[in-house]
């Protein structure tokens, strides 16, 4: 591949733990998803494919309990702790260093015990 081929994503490295909260952008959380607490979601997209089918970034959520319907996602927790219950499936205990895969359509309940920050790759 030549250096002028821009069809492939650029290689990059970032220290996810060193990205200040001030660099994260507020993300909308549907009030119907909140089961308890007052969780706040923030994030930063680091890369997105031209067609929007793949996204890589940083995501953070403060303590509380929320529901979600997942996309195909691989993420690694860099800080914090949560329990993720997958409807009809496993209960995942995640913390720093945990690598997790969620499948498109998984219905989940996230109990965030400590503000959780993750680096993710999502495919739509």
Image (tube, rainbow, N blue to C red):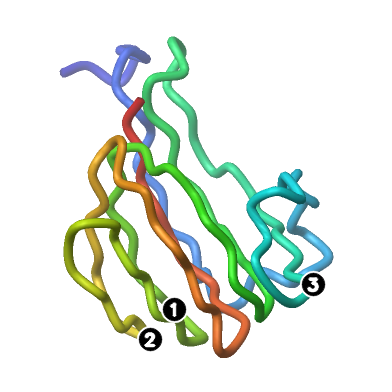
Q: Which dot, 3 or 2, sits closer to the camera? A: 3
Q: In this view, does 59 lie above or below 71?
A: below
Marks 1 and 3, Cα distance to the nearest angstrom?
22 Å
Toward which corner of the image does residue 42 lie, by quadrant?
Answer: bottom right
Marks 3 and 2, Cα distance to the nearest angstrom?
23 Å
Compared across the picture, whether 89 is left or right of 105 comes to: left
Which residue corresponds to mark 1?
78
Closer to the N terminus: mark 3 or mark 2? 3
Which residue corresponds to mark 3?
38
| Observer-nearest of 117 and 70 | 70
Q: Where is residue 17 in the image (x, y as percent from the top left)?
A: 55, 78
Tell me the crowding category of disc 1: few under 14, some 14 to 19, or many 20 or more residues within 10 angstroms, Cα based: many
Are the two marked residues, 1 and 2, in contact with CB atoms closer than 8 angstroms?
A: yes
- Name the residue: 45% across, 81% down: 82
| Observer-nearest of 113 and 74 | 113
| Observer-nearest of 114 and 32 | 32
Which residue corresponds to mark 2?
96
- Name the residue: 48% across, 28% down: 48
Q: Is mark 2 on a helix, strand or loop?
A: loop
């Amino acid at each position: 591949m030549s250096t002028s081929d821009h069809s492939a994503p650029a290689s990059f490295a970032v220290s996810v733990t060193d990205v200040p909260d001030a660099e994260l952008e507020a993300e909308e959380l549907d009030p119907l998803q909140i089961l308890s607490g007052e969780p706040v979601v923030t994030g930063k997209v680091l890369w997105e494919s031209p067609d929007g089918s793949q996204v890589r970034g940083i995501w953070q959520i403060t303590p509380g309990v929320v529901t979600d319907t997942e996309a195909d996602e691989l993420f690694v927790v860099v800080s914090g702790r949560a329990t993720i219950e997958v409807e009809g499936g496993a209960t995942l205990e995640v913390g720093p260093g945990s690598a997790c895969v969620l499948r498109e359509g998984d219905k989940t309940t996230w109990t965030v015990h400590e503000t959780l920050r993750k680096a993710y790759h999502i495919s739509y």
